[in-house]
Image (cartoon, coloured by chain):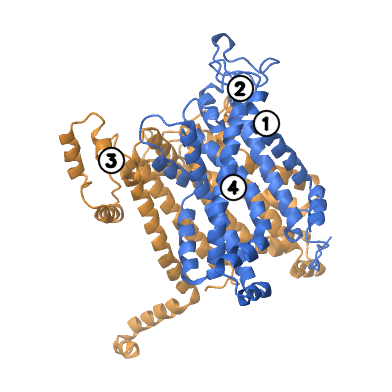
Amino acid sequence: MGQRFVRAFRRSVSGRVGLLLVAVFLVVAAGERRLAPWPPDQVSVERALLAPGPAHWLGTDDLGRDLLSRVLVGGRISLLIGVFSVLVAAALGVPLGLLAGYSGGFVDLAISRLVDVILAFPGILLAIALMAVLAPRQGDFTLEQGVANLTLAVAVVNLPAYVRQVRASAIGLRELEFVTASRALGAGTFHILFRVLLPNCLSPILVLATLGIGTAVLEAAALGFVGLGIPPGTPEWGTLLAENRSLFREAWWTVVGPGLAVSLTVLGFNLLGDGLRDALDPHTSSSSGGAGGAGAGRQELP
Amino acid sequence: MLARLLHRLPSPLAALLRACLGAARSPWIHYVVRRLLVSLPTLLAVAALCFSLVHLMPGDPARAIAGEKAPEREVERVRKQYGLDRPLPEQFVRYLEQAVLRQDLGRSWLTKRPVAAELGRTLPATFELTLAAMLIASLVGVGAGSLAALRRGGLWDHLTMVGALAGVSVPVFFLGLLLLMAFGRWLPAGGRSDPTDLYELRTRLVLLDALLAGRLDRFLDGLRHLALPALALATIPMAVIARMTRSSLLEVLSRDYVRTARAKGLPERSVLVRHALRNALVPIVTTVGLQFGSLLAGAVLTETVFGWPGVGSYVVEAIARRDLVALQGGILLIATIFVAVNLAVDLLYALLDPRIQLR
């Protein structure tokens, strides 16, 4: 399985490009302070609105702050929110999905209704509502608080995907012989859920989580863009775009840097997720078209 | 009992009743009724969530309405006037009653104007934008996806798929700014064409009203305002629709009946349009319908970038001013529309695809 997966993943162009992009952004997020050429908050009137050049690769904003440094520092915040919100969503969604799929009956009904209610809101709108509840009504709030709130809001919005996916996998698995066998051996519900069922539905969760980080980065940036969550002046990507929005006519680089950073990060995670899906599940592969698999009876006509 | 009652009724009436009963027994009607009943608790929960927006917040809503520096007496008066001194369940029932029976969503804390009226004013703008985006997304998405499927593995296929991937990766608010940079010189940078002074508004959709009034100049002006926001909003659904069309058509093209159609010697055009595309359409139509949600969500951001005076701008402004009643109303409206559209798509899907089990 492991070797086949690695071989399949290496064949996938999107997987390799995605991995490269993701790796670059993760390294940058890890060492952002050391990589940033200027202090991200250093204001300088004489360097205001400089176009990209050797001293400032992405130019400067209207306060003379170096945009590359701000984008680098902002990347840490955005990726932090992306990764942690996926972890929170999976930590809540996977047990709920396992429980719903395995138990059925009332438990399933209750969990599924909860998911329906979350899905009744267009994603970003629910996040906006949650942020409005979580954010203090007035006064200052810290960056840590803002990041925690954003993480939670984005996690709740993406919770249904995990519950639904894992529930579907669990329903497919629960009548299989090895599950019946461990029940007959006297295994408890907890053991069956997490030791028997969970290892067998890990691959779709992995794909979902990878794609989910991209979505989460996008949603967090959107919330920052409408002015929710992150204290003004913080170099978070969405907030950067919102701050420099009015400048784009005279200084295009003030929005292109942060915008490209968001887009490339999301693209990286999307590509990596696609590559993982192709490698983990050859049947739904977008590039191989079902050829070579056990059910390759359906050949495409020339 | 029922049979005897039917027997006694005058015959045309009995026939009508019998027909209705017959229809009610048909699986589709059953499905519709069941789905409607299932949607009700969802809508109730949505309303509860919106209601709790104001009440779960830290702080005192009465003080927020009266103003920070208002004397305690004034705050108490406001609390009584808005019924904020009543128990929460009672307040929720009253909120529902007012929202459903009188379309009253309360008054904005800031402008003191009724929220429902404000939303009624902004909704046509959002509707027009969403509709235009939907049109662009479906036409381009289905077209590009079909071409990609037909030229599988070719340059066009790769271009479409890369474009689709980029489409779902670029944030809509960044794309909006990019479009403004590229076309801002020729097209208006924001706002919506305002025809109120020029002719009578019938549908409140600028393009349609202009056409109905026979004002081609205003129609073109409306179009110029609409073009960029609609294009920005259309990208994500366009990408999703293109991918779905491609995979759906590829699957259908490998089916036996397409092989049969070709073997019969039908012209390729007819094979594609009458046999392949028609069968591939069911999942595509569903995808198109379900994209409506992402459009509504995207509209919040797109409207902000382009200063489009719709519900999304209203919601974002409400956030900025911490006007929770306005925010609550906006979110309730969008979520209700979203639930209704998804329900309609589900029902349509069941009607379109006879294979679906109406359980």
The residue under label 1 is A28
Query: Residues at badges 2 and 1 in contact (C-beta under 8 Å)?
Result: no
Q: Drawn colour of chain A? A: blue
Task: Give the residue at mark 2.
Answer: A67
In the rendered image, is residue B291 in sight?
no
Of badges 3 and 4, the one in the foreground is 3
**Where residue A16 sits in the image (x, y, percent)?**
77, 43
Which residue is pictured at 45% across the width and 64% down the height? A110
Q: Which of marks 4 and 2 is in front?
A: 2
Q: Which of marks 3 and 1 is in front?
A: 1
Task: Kindly identify which chain the residue marked by label 4 belongs to.
Answer: B
Examine the rendered structure and indicate whether residue A235 appears above or below residue A60.
below
Q: Distance between the residues labelled 4 and 2?
A: 31 Å
Per the rendering, the colour in which chain B appears is orange
Q: How far apart are marks 2 and 1 (CA)?
A: 15 Å
Q: Which residue position holds label 3? A: B61
Q: Are marks 2 and 3 on the same chain?
A: no
Question: For numbered disc 3, what is the local secondary structure?
Answer: helix
Residue B210: x and y, percent? 45, 39
Give me the C-alpha separation between circle 1 and circle 4: 31 Å
Dots 3 and 1 on the same chain: no
Pick the residue in front: A276 or B47.
Answer: A276
Mark 1 burial class by Cα count in 10 Å: few <14, some 14-19, many 20+: some
Which amino acid, by three-letter code, is at mark 3?
Pro
Quick one: label 3 or label 4, which is nearer the N terminus?
3
Same chain check for tags 2 and 1 = yes
Q: Do labels 3 and 4 share a chain?
A: yes
Front of the two marks 2 and 1: 1
The residue under label 4 is B237
The answer for how far apart the CA atoms under marks 2 and 3 are is 40 Å
